[in-house]
Image (spheres, grey):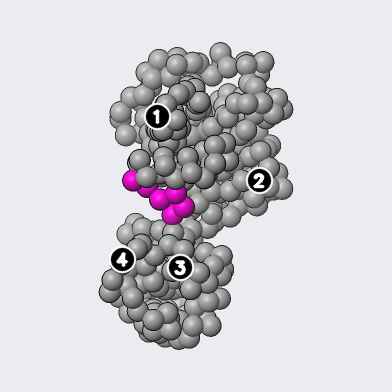
Amino acid sequence: MLAFPDCQMLDVTGPLQMFAGVNDELGRRVYELVIAAPKRGPFKTSSGVSLVAGLAIADVSPAKCRASDTVMAAGGDPGLRRALESGEIAALIKAASRRGSRIVSVCTGTFFLAAAGLLYGRRAATHWNYVERLRRFRPQVDVDPEAIYLRDGNVWTSAGVTAGIDLALALIEADFGRSVALAVARRHVVFRIRPGGQGQFSPELAAQGIRDQRLSKLAEKIAEEPKEDWRTDTLAAEAGVSLRSLSRLFRKELNASPSEFVERVRIDQARRALLETEAQIESVAIRCGFGSLRRMDRAFSRAISATPTEFRARFKPPGATA
């Protein structure tokens, strides 16, 4: 695990705990876990809690990187920029890749892989709030804003923070099979495969951080009344701004067009209704503002790569009631 001062602590500890869980589950050490940082010894994470690096990154020579190794890069602000500027982590990732190691990133750790040139022409995931920054950083990367994690050959990338746990479980399944991955997930009381993609998180969480009061009130109203006919001109009138200003506000604050945000809110509410109630799928489509099951089908296919029926069948907890 490649870490750095002021990284996100859970990017480091979440995946490592899953791998440690395999050792516990199998009763033997099949994964040897090592944290490497710019300097050996304690370093503070962004939470203020310190972790301890067993190795300095400079001590991890290319000769030590075997094909059997997994080299995983953590992410997290505010230390990411400094770590990128030093080039040390990206250089090690590039060298390890040449020797056949499996290369993995968690959250904004994707930026190190991009800096190393490993993501050119590949699909990659990162935290939803950093999608556009990654696209600007390396336009050659095919960034998927919805993916929780992705595998492209020997390169694996994940979305933000807790998505590193999802990714680690996928790596465990690749190494030891589905039954071991499921056992580790049960041991830690987490989904082996969580419902949906990143789109389920971004509308509600992003709306909470809106600084423009007009847009904040509008986002709340959309969430409260998803059945309304939220055409762009209606949204602009509700916010008291021009169509051009509305689009600019949405892009600046929510990294989405007005229509994209409305659809994300509706998908999020429909997803919850499908998982938490016994309501008929057609009634969910009406209640959440899609107007018809056909329109909800298309929206789900774009955002989650599954129909509402498939989504409910796959992810609805046993015994859930209305």
**N-terminal of the two: label 4 or label 1?**
1
Q: Which residue is mark 2?
A: 152
Q: Nearer the viewer, mark 2 or mark 1?
A: 1
Magenta residue check for 259: no
Q: Which residue is mark 3?
A: 313
Relative vertical location of residue 110 with respect to residue 217 in this rendering, above or below: above
Q: Does residue 213 appear in this view? A: no
Q: Are marks 2 and 4 in contact (CB under 8 Å)?
A: no
Q: Which residue is mark 4?
A: 319
* Residue in front for this viewpoint, 164 or 59: 164
Hey, what amino acid is under mark 1? Asp
Q: Which residues are magenta?
A: 189-194
Name the quadrant containing residue 153. top right
**What's the distance in space between the residues labelled 2 and 3, CA to CA?**
27 Å
Hey, what amino acid is under mark 3? Ala
Q: Are marks 4 and 1 in contact (CB under 8 Å)?
A: no
How dense is the environment of label 2, judged by Cα within 10 Å: few (below 14), some, or many (20 and up)? few
Q: Is residue 157 left or right of residue 223?
A: right
**N-terminal of the two: label 2 or label 3?**
2
How dense is the environment of label 3, judged by Cα within 10 Å: few (below 14), some, or many (20 and up)? few
> How many marks do you count on the picture?
4
Secondary element under disc 3, as helix, strand or loop, is: helix
Hey, what amino acid is under mark 2? Asp
Could you tell me what secondary structure mostly forms the magenta stretch? loop
Q: Position of residue 193 (x, y in %)?
A: 46, 52
